Amino acid sequence: MSRYADYFAAERRRHIEELLAFLRIPSVSALPQHAADVQQAAEWTAARLDRAGVSGVRVMPTGGHPVVYGEWLQAPGKPTVLVYGHFDTQPADPVELWTTPPFEPAIRDGRVYARGASDNKGNMLVPILAVEAMLRVTGGLPLNVKFFFEGQEEIGSPQLPAFVAEHRDLLAADLVISSDSFLWAPDQPQLLIGLKGLAAIEIEVKGARSDLHSGLFGGAVPNALTSLVEILASMHQRRPGGGAGRVAVEGFYDQVRPLSPEDRRRMAEVPFDEAAYAAELGVDTLVGEPEYTPVERLWARPTLEFNGLWGGFQGAGIKTVLPNEAHAKLTCRLVPDQDPREIVRLLTAHVERHRPPGVKVTVTRPPGNSWPYLMPADHPGNRAAHAVLTRVYGKEPYYARTGGTVPVIPLFLRELGAYTVGFGFASPDENFHAPDEFFRLESLDRGLEAYCAYLDALGETL
């Protein structure tokens, strides 16, 4: 047992009640009518940090939803870590699919059900409670700790790049610890060392000045939908036997960092049943670059996907027209060392080269692009986390990557020069962004133990 076990046992009821109070705040950042609730969640977080014994706590404006900062800097000569999380949530829709109301948290079978329970309020509260325990039990911390919690992660953190750049000195740290992370499974830890970046474009194709009768003009006048499909079909090579394979955009792979034998070995250690995976998703086969395994494609190879196509008649029945407009949205998930700005340039050039005659094509770049991220597996922060997670779970963590994108993590590396260790205790089955989201109370218990041990370890190893 750790030296904090008795404290946590005595305070467990209070900790759960505090989590329930936090979850009652409907801090939905995407909906303007909840802006005051996001502000309330920021103020709740600030007050909780203050009660924990953290100094310099403040709610700071960003031009959008606020951030919360606090610090404990009383360990001279010791390293500094920055603990990150977010107090905003996704919308709760469709509300009718929840067993209990999404902002009236309910405990069932050792789980707390509420929007934001797992992503990220339950996980975000853990390091606050852990630091409070360490201060009350030992009177201090083994290193310096800063806290940085935001209220706009679920909408892509639009104001954060400018904010972090402006407050680089305030946020300076040797390592970032993100509570916005997850386990491989409830009883299997992982260290998430890589994230994909994101590049996005929208394509608009215009033909004639209006829709035209397909019988009177078909075969002579360009069809915007046909032209768009031609452009899109040119963006992938075909796999042997059919299906999309490699991306066919010139220069797309030029900056891709090749996988090392060690990279491939670590990925091969992660259990993956291709047939079961396909069956669970309801597909007959998997696609992508045949020279890479599915895990390698999911985690460490770039992709180009079509996210939306529209144009022409969408109603029931038939309307015999040549559409004069067609549209597509597409995104690329990027890997080190791809630059999202360069990928947008390459995509734009490809579209222009493959523009069919007789139509006008416009490419626009929506907001939300992000850089890829990869952390050295043997970084001291990872080594310390590996030892702690092995002790807490009785199993060594997998070294994993994800095809998802978290823009703030490469932002911290770029602006602060600090890598980020994902140290969260959510599980993939906890219905993030879906009805009946939940957080296991067992994860709260393990997370508190692990955070205390991890901060102790970092004080010795960073």
Image (spheres, grey):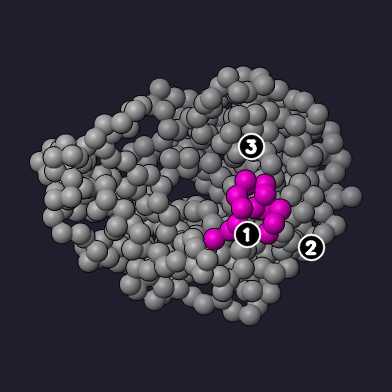
Q: Is residue 284 magenta?
A: yes
Count of marks placed on residues: 3
Please state which amino acid type lies under the numbered disc 2: Glu
Q: Which element carries disc 2, helix, strand or loop?
A: loop
Q: Nearer the viewer, residue 445 or 279?
A: 279
Please state which amino acid type lies under the numbered disc 1: Leu
The magenta span reads: 274-287
Residue contact between numbered discs 1 and 3, judged by CB atoms under 8 Å: no
Q: Quadrant of the C terminus?
A: bottom right
Q: CA distance from mark 1 to mark 3?
A: 19 Å
Farthest residue, direction bottom = 261
Q: Which residue is at 82% across, 39% downward?
A: 7
Residue contact between numbered discs 2 and 1, judged by CB atoms under 8 Å: no
Relative to 170, 365 lies left or right: left
Disc assigned to residue 431: 3
Looking at the image, is 415 positioned above or below residue 4? below
Residue 452 percent across, percent down from the top left:
74, 51
Q: Which element carries disc 3, helix, strand or loop?
A: loop
Q: In the rendered image, which residue does mark 2 sit on?
A: 396
Q: Nearer the viewer, residue 39 or 290?
A: 290
Q: CA distance from mark 3 to mark 2?
A: 25 Å
Disc 1 versus disc 3: nearer the observer? 3
Q: Which residue is at 49% across, 53% downward?
A: 405
Kindly indicate the quadrant of the structure image that contains residue 54.
top right
Please state which amino acid type lies under the numbered disc 3: Asn
Farthest residue, direction front = 215
Relative to 328, 196 lies left or right: right
- What crowding class fits label 1: few (fewer than 14 Cα within 10 Å), some (14-19), or many (20 or more)? many
Looking at the image, is 192 positioned above or below residue 68? below
- What crowding class fits label 3: few (fewer than 14 Cα within 10 Å), some (14-19), or many (20 or more)? some
Residue 14: in sight, yes or no? no
